[in-house]
Image (tube, rainbow, N blue to C red):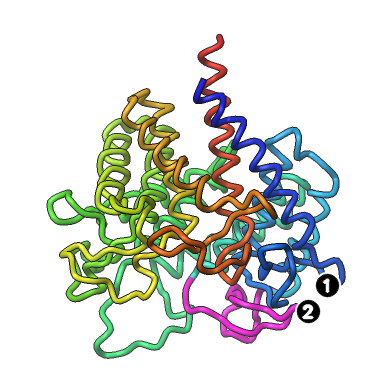
Amino acid sequence: SALQRYREQMRTELDKVVEFWQKYSHDTQYGGFFTCIGKDGKIYDELKYVWLQGRQVWMYCRLYRTMERFNKPEILEAAKSGGAFLRRFARIPNSGSPWKCAFCLTRDGKALKVQRTIFSECFYVMAMDELARVTGDKDMQAEAAQMMDQLVHWVRVDPSGLGKPQLSGDTPVCSMAVPMMLLCLVQQLTEARSGEEVDKYREVGGWCVKQILQHLQRGGTAILESVSSEGKELPGCAGRLQNPGHALEAGWFLLQYGLENGDQELQRTAVDKFMEIPFLTGWDKEHGGLLYFLDVDGYCPTQLEWSMKLWWPHCEALIAYLMAYSHTKEPALLERFSQVYDYTFSHFSDAENGEWFGYLTQQGKVTLDFKGGPFKGFFHVPRCLYMCEKILDSILNKQES
């Protein structure tokens, strides 16, 4: 069947992607991972990006813990090496907060750049919690929980610890990335656990969902990337910006949350609004693939890459539509999945050297030919292949039983 064919392809592709990163990304001298990797595996820059270090530790551990064929000592060792590198170097104590992490480090771990956002810290939490699940390290798990408390404080109480200067014309903006990221961490920290810690995170999870839903604007016809702190549309380009891939990712986050909490209305909103709207507006009818940015009023977005086709929105769309299909069994959702699948595997996957290209022109030609860079690491591709394989397993197992 088509589903079996998809599963085979996901499996084969995941094996190739894992093999690529195992072969080329490990820094055996200093620990951690190289992420600036050329199309054939050559390292073209030795800088280490904290987001990507954390994501790679998380992904290795998740594969090791939940997929039998990746339960190998070399994967665990690589994850531990990445975890040790992060614990040693990611946090920058002289930043005014003991929890602030760097964005970018030199090969040997010296802080080079810091962002005034929470994302390095978020991926640190994800990495530490998942690694602690695999190693049983209680200190590490406690550290993840402490950093999570700090993140929630920065987001909900007082962001001054992030070091962003207060400018007079700068009104508070709610970016959809923040509640999405925290919701992702809530799922990470509560999986298969119980007790008062978990109740505390449940409250945070509910808050995140409410925040994400505020991005559904214009009477439920558009998902906007940023809104005001009152949940209203912002003026100018920033207010009109749409990122279809990000909305689709939010869609499967919300669907997963809705399924876990038995919230039928949220499940429908996730599919009908956060998946369908960005797909219908974001799919390039002429060349195929998802556009990167759109302006809700049809102006040209000011981001230079707005019309490019990037790898990760397609990864998120595959997860979103397959997850939606597996729960609703609506054939139209499987058709969407197939449409994204055909484009993705024929354009991004590199049969010659393994792994995926990340950046294509609007017409679908590879324009940046590296496999890893400052923002592309071992995360969106393997997470997509891993989740799709798992979902296909469950659909096919139900069909057989």
Circle 2 SS class: loop
| Image position of 75 with respect to 69: above or below | below
Give the image location of residue 164, x and y in percent: 43, 84
Q: Residue at x 47, y 61 (%)?
A: 365
Most common secondary structure along the magenta stretch: loop
Give the amino acid at mark 2. Asp
The reply to whether residue 200 is visible in this rendering is no
Q: Residue at x 62, y 58 (%)?
A: 55
Left or right: residue 55 versus residue 135 is left
The reply to whether residue 326 is visible in this rendering is yes
- Toward which corner of the image does residue 98 lie, by quadrant? bottom right
Q: Residue at x 56, y 47 (%)?
A: 188
Circle 1 SS class: loop
Report the quarter where the C terminus lies.
top right
Give the residue pinned by disc 1.
Answer: 30
- Disc 2 to disc 1: CB gap under 8 Å: yes
Give the image location of residue 286, x and y in percent: 29, 53
Q: Residue at x 47, y 84 (%)?
A: 163
Q: Counting other residues with Cα less than 10 Å from the Cα at mark 1, is it few (<14), some (14-19), or many (20 or more)? A: few
Q: Nearer the viewer, residue 171 or 333?
A: 333
Range shown magenta: 90-117
Give the amino acid at mark 1. Tyr
Q: How many marks?
A: 2
Give the residue pinned by disc 2.
Answer: 108
Q: Earlier in the sequence, mark 2 or mark 1?
A: 1
* 111 inside magenta stretch: yes
| Image position of 249 with respect to 292: above or below | above
* 105 inside magenta stretch: yes
